[in-house]
């Protein structure tokens, strides 16, 4: 594996830490019940923006890696899902 592929895989497999995921889940649950303060709501928005940015970067990295390996994006994504840890953020 080339350094470029390793770097792309690092981006693809990046996710928020478990503590942040638990906090995000709590904010999401409380938001569903209308129990968030304005500050907590803004924090939730920041988390969601961060996750969206991570999804965009992941997709860009997947596309680049698929081009390098000369395989289609669906096949590459399946291969990566088999070898990586699950991310609950997306």
Image: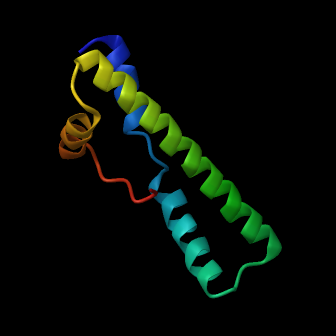
Quadrant containing the N terminus is top left
The outermost residue toward the right is 38
Whole-percent x and y of residue 68? Answer: 29, 16
> Which residue corresponds to the image point at 72% horizontal and 79% vertical from the top-left?
36
Decide if residue 12 is on the left or right side of residue 32: left
Picture mark count: 0
Quadrant containing the C terminus is bottom left
Whole-percent x and y of residue 65? Answer: 33, 23
Residue 53 location, quadrant:
top right
Q: Is residue 51 visible?
A: yes
Q: Is residue 10 visible?
A: no
Q: On screen, 51 above or below 68?
A: below
Of 76 and 40, nearer the camera is 76
Residue 32 location, quadrant:
bottom right
> Which residue corresponds to the image point at 56% horizontal and 79% vertical from the top-left?
29
Residue 37 location, quadrant:
bottom right
Of 20 and 83, nearer the camera is 83
The outermost residue toward the front is 72
Whole-percent x and y of residue 31? Answer: 64, 79
> Which residue corresponds to the image point at 28% horizontal and 48% vertical from the top-left?
85
């Amino acid at each position: 594996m080339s350094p470029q592929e390793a770097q792309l895989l690092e981006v693809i497999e990046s996710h928020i830490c478990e503590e942040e995921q638990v906090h995000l889940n709590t904010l999401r649950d409380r938001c569903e019940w209308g129990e968030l303060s304005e500050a907590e709501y803004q924090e939730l928005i920041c988390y969601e923006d961060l996750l969206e940015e991570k999804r965009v970067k992941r997709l860009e990295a997947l596309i680049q890696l698929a081009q390098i390996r000369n395989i289609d994006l669906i096949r590459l994504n399946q291969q990566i899902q088999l070898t990586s840890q699950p991310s609950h953020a997306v």
